[in-house]
Image (tube, helix red, strand yellow):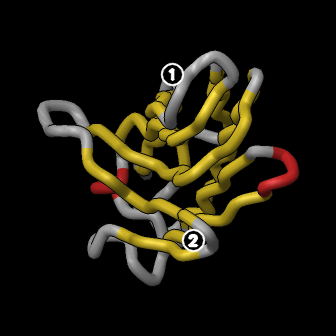
Amino acid sequence: QVQLVESGGGLVQPGGSLRLSCAASGSILSINAMGWYRQAPGKQRELVASIISGNTHYADSVKGRFTISRDNGKNTVYLQMNSLKPEDTAVYYCNCNAWPVGLSNYANYWGQGTQVTVSS
């Protein structure tokens, strides 16, 4: 159906930057929203940023530091993360609301997650 492959995580010092990418593949008829969630140890998964029809939404904790963008031709979503803080450390998951061949409606899909560690 739909597979999401993330890349771009890693270790970065406080104040540094990282860019995450997530490519959706499969027999996809349409993609609605795409977004990024994160989950830190001992905490619930939370929405970081989402994009739908060019409109973006950000968690208050990342506003002004993170930017989400999307390449519709490549079914890819990006998350540019600047001014990273230790509290941004988490596993980041890509999420996609897509309509694949064989289904009668949209469904949610998740990537495998990529670790982002902000530490000196």
Image coordinates for residue 28, horizontal then vertical, percent: 72, 31
Residue 31 in the image: state x and y as whole percent: 64, 46
Name the kind of residue labelled 1 in the image.
Gln
Tag 2: Cα neighbours inside 10 Å, few (<14), some, or many (≥20)?
some
Asked if residue 57 lies left or right of residue 75, the reply is left
Name the image quarter holding residue 62. Answer: bottom left
9 in relation to 53, above or below: above
Q: Nearer the viewer, residue 43 or 85?
A: 43
* Pick the front one: 62 or 22: 22
Q: Which residue is mark 1?
A: 112
Where residue 67 is drawn, which disc sits there? Answer: 2
- Vertical position of residue 48 compared to residue 116: above or below: below
Give the residue drawn at x 64%, y 22%. 3
Between 84 and 56, the residue placed more toward the observer is: 56
- Please give the name of the residue rendered at 62% of the width and 63% of the height, measured from the top-left corner: 80
Q: List the single residue furthest toward the bottom.
A: 64
**Dots 1, 2 in contact, CB < 8 A:** no
Disc 1, SS: loop
Is disc 2 placed on a helix, strand or loop? strand
Q: Residue furthest front?
A: 104
Identify which residue is drawn at 53% across, 40% down.
Answer: 96
